[in-house]
Amino acid sequence: MGARFLGRHLPCSIGRGGITTNKREGDGATPIGAHRILGMMYRPDRMHAPASWAEPIRVGDLWSDASGYADYNQLVRAPYVESCEQMRRPDPLYDLVMVTDWNYPVATAGKGSAIFVHAWRKPRHPTAGCVAFSRSDLLWLAANIVPGTRLIVKP
C-alpha cells in the first residue's frame, strides 16, 4: 500500500479491516473515497508546529467516538464520560494528526469516527481505520500540504 504526493511515493498503512465503501464505527476499515484534510494537530511538548495552520493538542483533548451523541466524531474535552480516544497518547502515534473530512464536521451516527492521518506503529502495521505513514514521511507531508488537500483511498 502506498501514497503518491508531489511526485513522491510514500509507503503507508491502512485499517486492519482493509478498505470499504460501507464504513461502520469500530470495523477497523479505511473508507474508500476522496477525503479532504481539514485540520492538523500536534503535540507541542514533543515537536514544533509542523505548519502554520496546525493546532496544538492540549492536555484533556479527546475525540468522541460515542455514536448517537451530538459530539460524535468531534474534538471534546475531559472530563468526558462517553466513549472517546485520547489525543495525547503515551506513544508517538498522535504526535502529529491530520483530520480528514470523513463523517466530519457533520457526523452521521455509526458511520465511523477519527479517520486521521498519523504516524504508523511500525512499517505497514495496520491501523484502526486511519491512514498512517512513517514519522519522516508524515512530517514531510505536513510541511507540504494545505487545508483541503485530498487524501484519495482507492479500491
Image (cartoon, grey):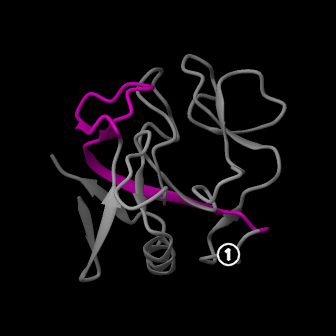
Magenta part of the protein: which range? 16-45
Residue position marked by numbered label 1 in the rendering? 49
Residue 126, percent across and down?
Answer: 37, 46
Q: Is residue 8 left or right of residue 64?
A: left
Mark 1 closeness class: few <14, some 14–19, many ≥20 residues within 10 Å: some
Q: Is residue 143 left or right of residue 77?
A: left
32 part of magenta stretch: yes
Image point (27%, 66%), residue name:
3
Q: Amino acid at mark 1?
A: Ala
Residue 28, percent across and down?
Answer: 39, 33
Image point (26%, 27%), residue name:
22
Marks counted in the figure total 1
Furthest residue to the left? 155
Image point (48%, 66%), residue name:
147
Of 64 and 16, the residue lying toward us? 16
> Mark 1 falls on what kind of element?
loop
Q: Is residue 104 left or right of residue 81?
A: left
Image point (60%, 23%), residue name:
66
